[in-house]
Amino acid sequence: MITIVDYGLGNIEAIANIYRRLDIPVRRARTAAQLADAQRIVLPGVGAFDWAMSRLDQSGMRATLDELVIGQSRPVLGICVGMQMMARRSDEGRCSGLGWIDGEVRAFDESSFTQRTHLPHMGWNHINAQRSGGILAGLEQDARFYFLHSYCFEAHRDQDVLARTDYGGAFASAVQRDHVHGVQFHPEKSHQWGIQLLRNFAAV
Amino acid sequence: MLQPRIIACLLVHKGGLYKTVAFAKPKYVGDPLNAVRIFNEKEVDELMVLDIDATREQREPDYALIRSLAAECRMPLSYGGGVHDVDQFERIVSLGVEKVAVSAAAVNDPSLITAAAERVGRQSVVVVLDVGRGKRGPEIKTHNGQRATGLDPADFAAKVESLGAGEIVLNSIDRDGAMQGYDLPLVRAVRERVSLPLTVLGGAGSLQHIAALVREFGIIGAAAGSLFVFKGVYRAVLINYPSRDDKARLLHDALAIR
């Protein structure tokens, strides 16, 4: 059973539709009580960092989410801003993050770019898997995903970086520390590559 | 490497999908949700849905339709039409839409762009510039091309970028539905003034037109309506989109020549 955290942001229905098509049980949690017995958790997100953090706080689910992920080691997948929320903080806002993966969210540094690019990073791009298997099983070669962001995750520990993507320079497009996963791209909007990733998460 | 985006653009009118020529003569092309399902199967890079009635009729976006489109869509979706305040941006993003577009509202009150970017993040703020002929050259128009603004597209593009827009959709009114190719001089004028992602709409009649755009501008959004909903000289309605292989070859060849 997949539980999608519905704190008012992100494409919950698109994620749920994909799981339904895969015949994987899925539900959404809008309250702490609905979240309480979640086995596998998807934390979606579209939007600015502070908006997302404050919506999560207002939802009343933050403490339960922390307990499930940190206290009970339930697998979690953060998507886009949902991934960024797992950091300690973000250049985009003033709120503190969930702090599940040691790192910070930084604005892309255009001055360091080695070729001319446009910001935000918008469109389909490749990922370079740093490890095989897990949520990237079958996606190690030639998978493409849809990105839409101006900020990116800077992991403090190299081993927490699951995949890198090149955009003016390499950045962490996926992170993983034990059962905690985050992807900067939108698997729910990335055709069969994204479907494969969501299917993988249901099996990790 | 980041790929150029080949975007299907759908116009919503009276609750159905229509395609216009020079912003007029709307022709019915089908049901929006059905079209989204077909585009899912065809693995379209991105979908843009513009409600061409909302601003003119001074009504709210059709949130029920947006919600069902976003749920059905397995590719990124941007929505435009009738959006004029920050709360609407927030509401539409919370329905599962990745990007929200404004046009007339950005002209009337450019500060809206900054306010929206602060709320939902600049990556989700799109400004659509409908460009037609003015007395002194190209000029931005609003309300489906009916109202002249006197604004120069390149100047205004630079302004909206500095205010926090995340993408500009450059739409040529004269080329709309003509299928004779994009307005490349207009794209040049705007591209050299802004560094944000740029999407071009209006005029694509063949994949060669898209290739020509990518050859000159590299990473860019190539959007089309008629090309992906009509087939043949009689403009029979048939939703189509290049296959994964055809698209890869087209982009590879176009980028290699640069």
Image (cartoon, grey):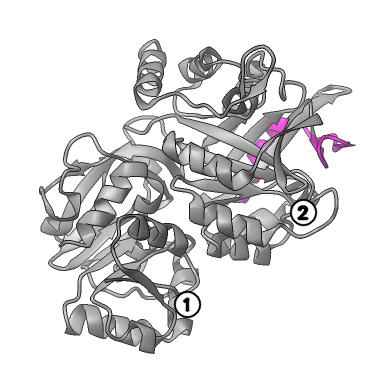
Circle 1 crowding by C-alpha within 10 Å: few under 14, some 14–19, many from 20: few
Q: What is the chain identity of the residue bearing mark 2?
A: B
* Residue B118: percent from left, percent from top: 56, 62
Q: Mark 1 points at which residue?
A: A54
Q: Find the magenta span and give its range.
A: B141-164
A180 up-or-down from B36: above or below = below
| Horizontal side of residue B181 vs B130, given as left or right | left
- Residue A102 visible? The answer is yes
Q: Three-letter amino acid code at disc 1?
A: Ser
Image height check: is A108 above or below A87? above
Residue A200 position in % (x across, y down):
20, 55
User: With A44 as the anchor, is B49 left or right in this view?
Assistant: right
Chain of the residue under label 1? A
Residue beneath the point at 25% across and 38% down: A143
How far across and down, in percent of the image, does residue A15 sit?
Answer: 39, 59
Residue nearest the observer in this picture, B149 or B203: B203
Near mark 2 (Cα within 10 A), the count class, few <14, some 14-19 or many ≥20, is: few
Q: In which quarter of the image is the C terminus of chain B?
A: top left
Provide the secondary structure element on which disc 2 rests.
loop
Image depth: mark 1 or mark 2 in front = 1
Q: Residue furthest bottom?
A: A33
* Mark linked to residue B109: 2
Residue A60 vs residue B255, the one in the foreground: A60
Which amino acid does the dot numbered 2 rest on? Asp
Magenta region includes residue B158: yes
